[in-house]
Image (cartoon, helix red, strand yellow):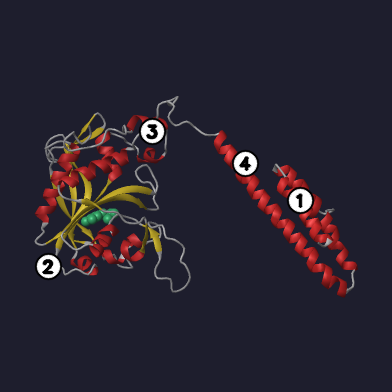
């Protein structure tokens, strides 16, 4: 055995016997530190003849590599053992009773989305989802929103930076839930009945606008669908949601690129103690109309963009703000408070985890 091999055996033995990380570090410094034994040997290489160096060099380097590897292996073993010890030490007994009862509550937005899913499930609608990071085509083009449409202006839409030249298309934060219409029509064969609740984003912020808010989209595609189906569906939904049969709707002609014809839907309400109570005919004394949602018959071009034949398939769609629905039903007056995460607000307006909305048990039980 050469001197170097003997030295390596000795050092490795000491390393393997080190019982903690401090001892190991001391060994490392003694061998590989500035004044370490192996470092000293490496320094002697400079004073050797090239021939000597050719013989001794590889031996010293192999010594250094062997010791370095032994140090690393021992370090990993000691660290693993330390972690095991820590885990054993910090183990929590999950079967012990909690020392404080849980304080969480279900956010009104989540609760309302659950209410919507329940109401529409009863009418045969499934819940569909789509990505919040959307591409330009699904968010705009496929929905018949041309390049020049104001909705595309930078002040409304959060765009992602363009990634390189020839990138397929610009990505953005979806500005509405309508792209889920497109994704659903492209993925599933009609007949289609879905709602799509979710987050949407617009660069807009004041008392009634937050950069992130929630919408629910509705889409029905089938044969022979007409505006009567739309009105009936909305009436049924709003009666169940506001828990009153006294819902009167007013459909006003409007414009959305993705529907033709389009209708803005107003609902009658009256003002009571500074709050809007939904119900009644907006033309009656003490009542007024409030704009609630956008809707219409799905534009033939949108149906065709999704690869369906618009002569065979028709449908209606609608979109409504979920936060707005929650405010109207549960009486909050500032949208911004929805997203402040204030525990007092959440305790006041939040719902217990067990108050699950069901049609049989009462939607807002
Ligand atoms: N996407 C529209 C918006 O965000 C809302 C909307 C209007 C959705 C009409 C629809 C619709 O499905 O038919 O302002």
Query: In 3D space, how far apart are the residues under numbered discs 3 and 4 (Cα atoms)?
Result: 35 Å
Extreme residue toward the front, this view? 1
Tell me which image quadrant ligand 1 sits in. bottom left
Query: In 3D space, how far apart are the residues under numbered discs 1 and 3 (Cα atoms)?
Result: 51 Å
Q: Under tag 4, what secondary structure?
A: helix
Which label belongs to residue 237? none
In front: mark 3 or mark 4?
A: 4
Query: In 3D space, how far apart are the residues under numbered discs 4 and 1 (Cα atoms)?
Result: 19 Å
| The C terminus sits in image quarter | top left
Query: In 3D space, how far apart are the residues under numbered discs 2 and 1 (Cα atoms)?
Result: 79 Å
* Tag 3–tag 2 contact (CB < 8 Å): no
Where is residue 130? Give x, y as percent: 32, 56
Instruction: Name the residue at 14% across, 53% down.
Output: 230
Which label belongs to residue 28? 1
Q: Under tag 1, what secondary structure?
A: helix
Which label belongs to residue 104? 3
Density class for disc 4 (Cα within 10 Å; few <14, some 14-19, many ≥20) is: some
Q: Earlier in the sequence, mark 4 or mark 2?
A: 4
Q: Under tag 2, what secondary structure?
A: loop
Instruction: Name the residue at 27% across, 63% down.
Output: 143
Q: Earlier in the sequence, mark 3 or mark 2?
A: 3
Q: Is residue 303 visible?
A: yes
Indicate left or right for 259 with 43 as reference: left
User: In the displayed structure, would residue 232 be above or below residue 135?
Assistant: above
In front: mark 3 or mark 2?
A: 3
Where is residue 116? Give x, y as percent: 23, 44
Q: Which residue is mark 2?
A: 312
Q: Earlier in the sequence, mark 2 or mark 1?
A: 1
How many numbered discs, if any?
4
Instruction: Name the residue at 28% across, 45% down.
Output: 322
Q: Which residue is mark 4?
A: 82
Query: In 3D space, how far apart are the residues under numbered discs 3 and 2 (Cα atoms)?
Result: 49 Å
């Amino acid at each position: 055995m050469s001197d170097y091999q003997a030295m390596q055996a000795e050092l490795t033995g000491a390393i393997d016997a080190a019982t903690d990380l401090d001892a190991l570090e001391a060994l490392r410094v003694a061998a590989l530190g500035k004044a370490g034994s192996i470092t000293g040997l490496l320094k002697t290489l400079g004073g050797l003849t090239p021939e000597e160096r050719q013989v001794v060099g590889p031996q010293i380097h192999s010594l250094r590599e062997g010791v370095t590897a032994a140090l690393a292996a021992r370090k990993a073993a000691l660290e693993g053992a330390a972690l095991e010890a820590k885990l054993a030490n910090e183990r929590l007994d999950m079967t012990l009773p909690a020392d404080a009862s849980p304080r969480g509550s279900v956010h009104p937005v989540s609760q309302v989305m659950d209410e919507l899913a329940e109401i529409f499930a009863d009418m045969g609608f499934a819940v569909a989802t789509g990505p919040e990071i959307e591409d330009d085509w699904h968010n705009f083009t496929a929905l018949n929103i041309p390049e020049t449409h104001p909705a595309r202006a930078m002040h409304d839409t959060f765009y992602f930076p363009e990634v390189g030249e020839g990138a397929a298309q610009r990505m953005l934060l979806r500005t509405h839930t309508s792209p889920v219409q497109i994704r659903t029509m492209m993925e599933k064969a009609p007949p289609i009945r879905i709602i799509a609740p979710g987050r949407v984003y617009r660069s807009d912020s004041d008392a009634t606008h937050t950069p992130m808010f929630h919408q629910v989209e509705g889409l029905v595609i089938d044969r022979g669908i007409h505006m009567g189906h739309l009105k009936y569906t909305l009436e049924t939904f709003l009666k169940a949601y506001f828990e009153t049969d006294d819902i009167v709707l007013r459909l006003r002609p409007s414009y959305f690129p993705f529907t033709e014809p389009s209708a803005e839907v107003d609902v009658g309400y009256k003002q009571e103690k500074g709050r809007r109570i939904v119900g009644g005919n907006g033309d009656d004394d003490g009542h007024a109309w409030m704009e609630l949602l956008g809707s219409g018959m799905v534009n033939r071009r949108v149906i065709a963009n999704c690869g369906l034949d618009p002569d065979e398939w028709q449908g209606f769609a609608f979109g409504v703000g979920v936060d707005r629905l929650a405010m109207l039903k549960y009486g909050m007056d500032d949208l911004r408070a929805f997203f402040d995460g204030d525990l007092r607000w959440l305790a006041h307006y939040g719902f217990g985890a067990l108050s699950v909305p069901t049609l049989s048990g009462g939607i807002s039980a």
